[in-house]
Amino acid sequence: MRRALPIVALLLAGCSGVQTMTEGAGFGSRQFNSLMLLFLIVTGISFALVLIFLLLALWRRRSEPGEARVRSWLIAWIAFIVIGLILLTGASFLSDRREATAAADQQPLKVTVSASQWWWGIEYQNDDPSRIIHTANELHLPVGRPVQLKLNSGDVIHSLWIPALAGKQDLIPGRDNDIRILPTRIGRYRAQCAEFCGLQHAHMAFDVTVESPQAFAAWYAAQLQPAPEPATPLAKAGHDWFMSHACSNCHAIGGTDANGRTGPDLTHLASRRTIAAGTLQMSRGNLMGWIENPQGVKPGARMPTVGMSADELHAVASYLETLK
Amino acid sequence: MGLALLSSLLLLGACRREDRSQTTDPHAEGAAGGAVIAAPEQAHYAASAYHLGEGQRLYRWMNCNGCHGPAGGGGMAPSLMDAKWRYGGSMADIVRTIDVGRPNGMPSFHDRLTGQQMWQLAAYVRSLSGLAPKDAVSSRGEEFSTKAPYTQRKPAQPPKPGEAY
């Protein structure tokens, strides 16, 4: 008992944080939590009843069967099962309907999420093409507005899971899938690929920032801006190296010649909290380590070891740091 | 007993997993585009399923299929499935072609690809015309190929005249 206590305490500690279903920061996950609670109560009662009947059967002395009593017990038992089943089925249906029609009067924000081994491409759709933004491995959402995520995959099956906000949905190559999310609480949450997709499946995550509509509008406006011109000579040298070597072949930086789409968009790289799809914190040291030897950080990642001299590495890192 | 021992030894023989060298020393290759590498290293790229697979991905990513056609069928640029090589068909020749480019349209990828990527591409290009070892090539490729798939099925016989089918 004394040994079990700390384990239980540890398990309970897992019930809060950036990546838990119990967080209930979205309409879908709150619905799910209350549905889960109802299931737990109904199935818990029936489990307890079965145990009680079993114990009674063991302890009671066998006497002449009371035919009438057995029958009334049976009727009560069947009625309980039927009512329980109807209750749970009805609750599941209603919960699903409520989730589907939540905030149906509001125009949803449309975002396309494209998964690749092993990162997430994010594209905010807009009827005005000049207001479409590309980013990677980060999702900003305004609180209280529904968002329609269109999901597709470029290589294998992935699955998008933001436990604090909603359930999972698969991203399937060659097929459009979607999920509707309604974030209800401001905060930073974590999304994780939930379908094994290869070597670096575990290192395929991103930050979901739910913020006030004003903060979201400010972020969106900043994302619409092209990357700033490099100011210092070192950053300028890094810019030139980036544009004239393999980097620009796969990565895009808005406002420059780099327009590759096979790797993450780097236009506002330095404003993100993490690099390499949630693998490392954004910092000068981590950035340099990642560029110098991606296969050491994330073996199997599609980013090759480019092979740079120390000077070139410093220059490119200081250029990337200016991409706020 | 002897038979069981022998067969278990045989089974263990299959336990060797192909070595996936994702990288070598960060500075060894790539610094000078398609840097020249030693012959054994070339042979390793040419016979590795991992590198062939990476080459196949790069073939699409770098839009080689835009001119050479999907699976090297040819189009604006020469076919890569046949036995003709204008600039040589060895690993080193193909890497050189990718690295420096060729007249009449083949661009140079000197600053666009690392050395390792060029060797992977070269290995894949050779596999298109059946020059890669059979045990390294994917046996269930989805694209058209010059070779019959490596399966256990008997090759289909063309129907004979007058035969019902």
Image: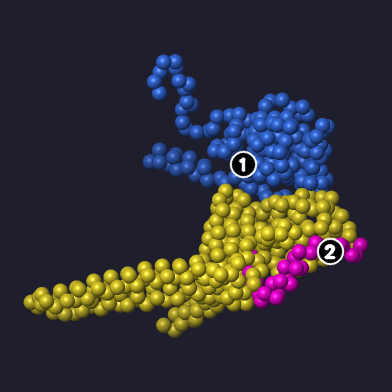
Residue A82: tell me if it is visible. Answer: yes
Q: Mark 1 falls within which chain?
A: B
Return the residue at label 1.
Answer: B49
Image location (x, y in percent) of residue A67: 10, 75
Residue A198: tell me if it is visible. Answer: no
**Quarter of the figure that contains the N terminus of chain A:** bottom left
Image location (x, y in percent) of residue B158: 48, 21
- Tell me the residue at 69%/45% (across/down): B61
Marker count (numbered): 2
User: Looking at the image, what colour scheme do you see?
Assistant: by chain
Q: Is residue A207 magenta?
A: yes
Residue farthest top in this picture: B161
The residue lying toward the viewer, choosing from A279 and A256, is: A256
Q: Which hue belongs to chain A?
A: yellow
- Tell me the residue at 84%/50% (across/down): A244
Q: Which chain is blue?
A: B
Q: Which residues are magenta?
A: A206-233
**Three-letter residue code for mark 1:** Ala
Residue A95 figure quarter: bottom left
Quick one: SS at disc 2? loop
Q: Is B134 on the left or on the right of A227, as rendered?
A: left
**Three-letter residue code for mark 2:** Pro
Residue A291 figure quarter: bottom right
Q: Is A170 on the left or on the right of B112, as rendered?
A: left
Return the residue at label 2.
Answer: A228
The residue lying toward the viewer, choosing from A18 and A91, is: A91
CA distance for labels 1 and 2: 42 Å
- Tell me the residue at 61%/41% (across/down): B49
